[in-house]
Image: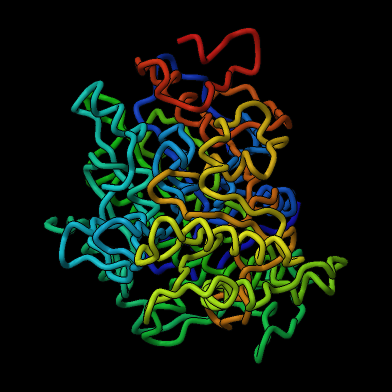
C-alpha cells in the first residue's frame, strides 16, 4: 500500500498532525429505518473519466464510497453540461427542460432585460441584481428540491447547503433553505438579509489568517509524477503547478485544493452548530466542492494540478465523513458531479487526440451576427442582430417577427456549413421533439438538446460543436484554458456513488441518470412524493433480494 498522501497546505483549521483512518474502517451494521441525515456531495467537473483514472489511488473518503453502491456511468443526460443545469438535476430529479435551468446564463429577448443576460441563480426582480453581482436566489428553479420535499413532509427538517459557488447552493438547496453559504471575495457569505452564523464568522476569520500568511506548495504524490509535464498554452504553461499561496491572494486560495478543504470545514462546523442529524426529523446537507472545476478550467484535467487535487479531494471528503462518524450520526451519502470536462487541446494533441482543437472565432455571436446581416441585408441598428452565449443564439427583437425566420434560416445555413459544428436545431424543431426516455447513452444529439430546452429561456436556435472542440478561441491563462458544456460523454458521464453503513457493495456499469438520485433518496427516507414529480427512477441500493425502492 502506498504511503498516504498528506497535503502540506490544507486549510489551517484542518488537523493533519494525526490523520484519521476512520474513512477506511470496517463499517458498522446497517441501521434500521430512515437515516437522520442525507449528505449529498457534488464534485464540480468530476467526470467519470477522472474517477476511473484516479480510483486506484483513493485512500480516504472516495475509497469508502467506492465500497458502496457504485454507478460509474451516471449521466447528466442533457446537452448543456454546465454548473447550474447539472446541479439542478441532482436533488430535483428532473431534467433542465423541466426545471427551467437551461444554462448558467441565458437571455429572454421578450423580457425586461432584452439582450442583457440573466444569471441562473439571481433574482433580477431586485434592482440591485446583475449577472456579475447577483442577488442570489433560487427564483428561476421551477421545481422543489429533495430538501424542500423533506421540509414539506416535516417542517422540523433542516435544509443546509454549502459551496464555493452560489449557483450550486441554490440549485441543491432550493427555495426553502435554512442555511446557505458560498464563497465571495475572500470568505463565505449568505443570502441577502441574513446574518452569517458564528460558525461562518469563525471560518472566515481562519481564512483571513491563512490569506495573510500565505502557504507552501502542496506535495506531489508519487503517482502524479507522469502528469508533471509542462505544456505550452497560449503565452504560458500548465501541467506543473502545485498551488503555492502568495499572501493576500484569495483567487489563488479559490483555485486550489484549499477551497474544498475550507468548504468541508464550514460544513463540519454547521453540523455541530445546528446539531444536524439529531433533530426531530431527518436533515439535508448539500456540499458542493468546486476546486476540481476551478483547477480544471485554469490548467486542464491531465496535469499535475488535477492529480494533486484528486488526492486532496479524497482526503477532504474523508474528513467530512469522519466528522459525521465521530458524532455517531446515522446518515446516507450520495456523491456525483454536475458535469465532466475536456482537457486543454494543446495537451490532448500530445496525447493521441489531435482532433481536439479550439473553436474558430467565426462561430462567435458577434461574427455570426455580422455574417447574417450581410447575408440577409437586415440589421438591428446599433445593437447586434444576433446575440447569445454558448450554443444558444437569439434574434434581436427589434427585428420584425416576419423577418426573424429569414435571420434564423440564414444562421442555420452559416452554422451548418462550419466543419466544427456537429448539429444545429431551431426552437421550432426542439419544440416538436418529444422528451427523451430510455438509455441516456443512446440519446441522439437532438434528444440531448431537447432535455435542455425551455420555450422561453432557450435560444431561437441551438448549435453544438463537434467532439473535441474546446469552445474557448483564445486561452485565458490562469482562468480558462479548458472547459465543458458539450453534449459529448466526456462532459455528460459522471460517477454516482451511494453509501450507508452496512450497505452491500455492488457495481452496476449500466447507464443511470443524475435525475435518479432524488427518487432513490426519497424512497430511502420513506417520503411520499406525488406521482410524476420526478423524471428519474428509484435505484434499488439493497444489492440483494431486498429492495430499497419498496419502502
- In the rendered image, residue 42, in percent from the top left (x then y), is placed at 49, 47
In percent of the image, x 58 and y 45: which residue is there?
A: 449
* Residue in the image at 34% along x and 61% along y: 118
As drawn, which residue projects farthest toward the right? 352
Residue 37 position, x and y percent, is: 36, 31
Residue under the image location 65 percent in, 13 percent down: 544
Question: Is residue 107 among what the camera can see?
Answer: yes
Direction from residue 222 to residue 530 in the image, left or right: left
Q: Position of residue 122 (x, y in %)?
A: 28, 57
Quarter of the rendering containing residue 476: bottom right
Query: Where 411 sits versus 25, above or below?
Result: below
Please give the count of numbered marks on the rendered protein: 0
In this orientation, which residue lies closer to the viewer: 351 or 422? Answer: 422
Can residue 318 be seen at all in this image of the molecule? no
Give the position of the C terminus as an image quadrant.
top left
The correct choice, above or below, for 423 with respect to 363 in the image is above
Residue at (74% x, 62% y) in the render: 468
Amino acid at each position: 500500500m502506498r504511503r498516504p498522501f498528506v497535503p502540506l497546505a490544507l486549510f489551517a483549521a484542518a488537523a493533519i498532525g494525526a490523520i484519521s483512518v476512520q474513512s477506511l474502517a470496517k463499517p458498522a451494521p446497517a441501521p434500521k429505518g430512515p437515516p437522520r441525515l442525507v449528505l449529498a456531495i457534488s464534485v464540480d467537473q468530476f467526470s467519470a473519466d477522472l474517477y476511473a483514472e484516479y480510483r486506484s489511488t483513493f485512500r480516504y473518503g472516495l475509497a469508502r464510497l467506492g465500497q458502496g453502491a457504485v454507478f460509474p456511468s451516471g449521466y447528466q443526460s442533457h446537452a448543456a453540461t454546465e454548473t447550474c443545469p447539472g446541479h439542478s438535476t441532482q436533488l430535483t430529479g428532473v431534467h433542465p427542460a423541466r426545471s427551467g435551468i437551461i444554462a448558467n446564463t441565458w437571455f429572454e429577448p421578450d423580457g425586461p432585460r432584452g439582450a442583457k443576460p440573466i444569471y441562473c441563480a439571481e433574482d433580477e426582480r431586485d434592482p440591485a441584481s446583475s449577472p456579475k453581482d447577483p442577488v442570489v436566489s433560487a427564483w428561476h428553479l421551477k421545481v422543489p428540491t429533495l430538501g424542500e420535499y423533506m421540509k414539506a413532509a416535516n417542517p422540523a427538517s433542516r435544509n443546509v447547503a454549502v459551496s464555493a459557488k452560489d449557483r450550486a447552493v441554490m440549485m441543491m438547496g432550493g427555495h426553502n433553505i435554512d442555511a446557505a453559504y458560498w464563497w465571495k471575495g475572500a470568505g463565505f457569505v449568505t443570502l441577502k438579509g441574513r446574518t452569517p452564523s458564528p460558525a461562518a464568522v469563525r471560518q472566515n476569520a481562519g481564512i483571513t489568517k491563512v490569506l495573510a500568511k500565505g502557504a507552501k506548495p502542496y506535495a506531489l504524490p508519487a503517482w502524479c509524477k507522469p502528469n508533471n509535464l509542462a505544456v505550452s498554452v497560449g503565452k504560458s504553461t500548465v501541467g506543473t503547478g502545485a498551488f503555492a499561496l502568495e499572501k493576500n491572494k484569495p483567487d489563488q486560495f479559490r483555485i486550489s485544493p484549499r477551497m474544498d478543504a475550507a468548504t468541508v470545514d464550514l460544513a463540519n462546523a454547521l453540523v455541530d452548530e445546528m446539531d444536524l442529524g439529531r433533530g426531530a426529523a431527518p436533515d439535508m446537507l448539500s456540499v458542493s466542492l468546486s476546486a476540481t472545476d476551478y483547477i480544471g478550467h485554469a490548467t486542464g484535467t491531465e496535469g499535475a494540478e488535477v492529480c494533486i487535487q484528486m488526492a486532496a479531494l479524497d482526503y477532504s471528503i474523508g474528513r467530512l465523513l469522519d466528522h459525521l462518524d465521530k458524532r455517531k450520526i446515522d446518515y446516507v451519502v450520495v456523491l456525483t458531479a454536475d458535469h465532466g470536462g475536456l482537457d486543454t487541446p494543446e495537451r490532448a494533441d500530445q496525447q493521441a487526440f489531435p482532433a481536439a482543437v479550439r473553436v474558430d472565432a467565426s462561430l462567435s455571436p458577434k461574427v455570426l451576427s455580422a455574417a447574417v446581416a450581410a447575408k440577409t441585408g437586415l440589421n438591428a441598428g446599433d445593437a447586434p442582430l444576433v446575440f447569445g452565449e454558448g450554443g444558444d443564439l437569439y434574434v434581436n427583437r427589434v427585428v420584425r417577427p416576419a423577418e426573424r425566420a429569414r435571420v434564423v434560416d440564414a444562421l442555420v445555413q452559416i452554422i451548418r456549413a462550419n466543419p466544427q459544428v456537429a448539429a444545429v436545431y431551431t426552437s421550432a424543431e426542439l419544440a416538436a421533439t418529444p422528451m427523451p426516455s430510455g438509455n441516456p447513452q443512446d440519446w441522439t444529439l437532438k434528444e440531448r438538446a431537447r432535455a435542455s430546452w425551455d420555450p422561453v429561456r432557450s435560444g431561437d436556435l441551438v448549435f453544438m460543436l463537434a467532439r473535441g472542440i474546446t469552445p474557448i478561441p483564445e486561452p485565458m491563462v490562469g482562468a480558462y484554458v479548458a472547459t465543458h458544456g458539450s453534449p459529448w460523454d466526456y462532459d455528460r458521464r459522471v460517477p454516482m456513488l451511494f453509501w450507508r453503513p452496512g450497505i452491500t457493495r455492488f457495481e452496476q456499469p449500466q447507464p443511470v441518470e443524475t435525475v435518479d438520485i432524488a427518487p432513490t433518496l426519497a424512497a430511502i427516507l420513506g417520503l411520499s412524493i406525488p406521482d410524476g414529480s420526478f423524471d428519474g427512477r428509484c435505484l434499488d441500493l439493497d444489492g440483494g433480494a431486498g429492495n430499497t425502492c419498496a419502502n
